[in-house]
Image (cartoon, grey):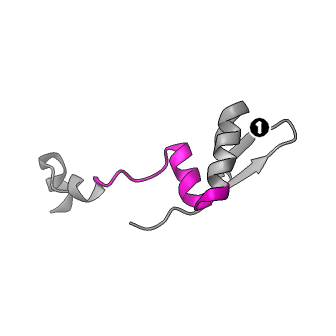
Amino acid sequence: MPAPHGFAHERRADGTVTITHHGRAATTLRGPRAEKFLAEVAAGDPQLVMARWTGAYKFGNERRAGEHPRNRSRRD
């Protein structure tokens, strides 16, 4: 699975953190959640952390979805 890309975050003076994906706002974090997010970004891969916090990551079932009977006609 390719690593996510296109995420960025901005910390504002009031402590709010805004996460964007390809320039569009994906989520805004405030208070303790913002601090926890910033700690995770500092400790790990920022792109993976932001993808997880926004919910914009793959769950691993995309490859199997093409095998489902509902989707077979689309592949043929």
| Residue at the image position 12 percent from the left and 48 percent from the top | 69
Quadrant assignment for the C terminus? bottom left
| Residue at the image position 80 percent from the left and 38 percent from the top | 15
Q: Mark 1 points at which residue?
A: 16
The residue carrying pointer 1 sits among few (fewer than 14), some (14 to 19) or many (20 or more) residues within 10 Å by Cα, namely some
Q: Position of residue 63 (x, y in %)?
A: 26, 59
Quadrant assignment for the N terminus? bottom left
The answer to whether residue 16 is above or below residue 50 is above
The answer to whether residue 73 is left or right of residue 21 is left
Q: Position of residue 3 (x, y in %)?
A: 48, 66
- Asked where in the image residue 42 lies, by quadrant, the reply is bottom right
Question: The magenta stretch spans which residues?
Answer: 42-61
Which residue type does callout 1 highlight?
Thr
| Residue at the image position 31 percent from the left and 55 percent from the top | 60
Point out the residue furthest to the left here: 69
Residue 63 vs residue 36, the one in the foreground: 36
- Asked where in the image residue 29 lies, by quadrant, the reply is top right
